[in-house]
Image (tube, helix red, strand yellow):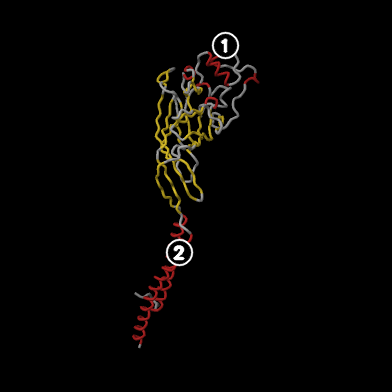
Amino acid sequence: MRRNGETPTGGMLSQFKEFDVYSKVTIAMLFVSELDTYFNIEVVDHIIVDTTLDQKLSIGLNITFPHLRCDEVSVDTVDNMGQNQVDVSGGLVKINLNKDGQPSDGDIDEAVKGCGPCLEAADFDPSRCCNDCTELRQAYTDNGLPYYHILDTAPQCKHSIGCRVHGDVQVSKVAGNVHVALGKSRIRDGKHVHEFNIQEVGDGFNTSHSIHRLDFGERVRGMQSPLSGTTKIVKHGAFMFHYYIKLVPTIFEGAGRKVYTHQYSVSDNEKNVMVKKGELVGLPGVFLVYEFTPFLVHKVEKTVPLSNFLTSVCAIIGGVFTVAGMIDAILYRGYKRLRKVNTKGSL
């Protein structure tokens, strides 16, 4: 049906203009789609047998222990080849934390006030002075008293009740574990042992922790870190946390460089090893137990060459204009025939 005041010729010209707009919109949409494909990087995976067994592995840590002091946190490593590292310090930094979880300058020395109080231990020796946290803990230990419950409130200790550990640990590429556990770590007869006085943990050993970062090798864009953001809170007792980590050696190749790193999956288990006061059935701590798969994943970034992109854009423009030309020709013939019919009718 013809609109009021509109001739057949005018309606046809209006359709031509609308068709021209449609062509330009089509070209723009196809161009944007092709541009998106050009900038998106496709990653192609290949799985091969891993032969890179003589390399060292860098484990990146950033873990907060809100209720373990830095002098109680010893990061140790043990592997299946019998290699042990006790209280790793070279690539790790320990930061004292106060009760609010903020960095602190460490303990306050009460000696400036005279003789610092020994709190409950003063009942056994009223004349004894406890001017720092180490002396206070020693006073409790000498008298067979557990001291963990007073660390958060004692004036000598409350300014440094937690610890954040961050940095890198170098280990051999064999199965093993990295752990922070109760007691002083020592190597005795070639074995890794932890020495402690059970009386010190009569009121528990708080292994609450937050894992901010845990990487095995260099961090690569787009690679997931399943344990990052993990938090475990202990409200009572003494817990042993195990994280069983399956490492997948991975090579990322792209952007002119090749990176050797590891992806991983994890499962975990936790257990209260203090079945009753003064008795442990395990070693309280946090254990990161890792092992390697025998296969290596080779990830290669596949990009679209600029020549392919330009060719596709030219093909889009040329194709749209070709189709538009064909449709335009058909419409033009129809327009001429309609004009002839109108001319004959007016005669």
Q: Is residue 183 above or below residue 340?
A: above
Image coordinates for residue 335, horizontal then vertical, percent: 37, 79
Q: Is residue 53 above or below residue 134?
A: below
Proximity of marks 2 and 1: CB atoms separated by less than 8 Å:
no
Mark 2 is surrounded, within 10 Å at the Cα level, by few (under 14), some (14 to 19) or many (20 or more) other residues, namely few
Q: Nearer the viewer, mark 2 or mark 1?
A: 2
Look at label 2 and name its amino acid.
Thr
Q: Nearer the viewer, residue 67 or 175?
A: 175
The Cα atoms of the two marked residues, 2 and 1, are separated by: 90 Å
Q: Quadrant of the N terminus?
A: bottom left
Q: Quadrant of the C terminus?
A: bottom left
Q: Nearer the N terminus, badge 2 or badge 1?
A: 1
Q: How many marks?
A: 2
Label 2 sits on a secondary structure element that is: helix
Image coordinates for residue 103, horizontal then vertical, percent: 57, 32
Q: Nearer the viewer, residue 222 or 95?
A: 222
In the figure, is residue 274 to the left or right of 120? left
Q: Is residue 181 above or below residue 305?
A: above
Image coordinates for residue 48, horizontal then vertical, percent: 40, 44
**Mark linked to residue 68:** none
Residue occupied by mark 2: 311
Which residue lies most toward the bottom here? 347
Please report the residue visible at 62 percent of the width from the left and 22 percent of the height from the top: 109
Residue occupied by mark 1: 125
Label 1 sits on a secondary structure element that is: loop
Look at label 1 and name its amino acid.
Asp
Please report the residue visible at 48 percent of the width from the left and 43 percent of the height from the top: 260
Image coordinates for residue 152, horizontal then vertical, percent: 53, 24
Q: Is residue 3 above or below residue 105?
A: below
Q: Would you identify the image quadrant in which residue 107 lies?
A: top right
Please report the residue visible at 46 percent of the width from the left and 46 percent of the height from the top: 252
Please report the residue visible at 56 percent of the width from the left and 23 percent of the height from the top: 157
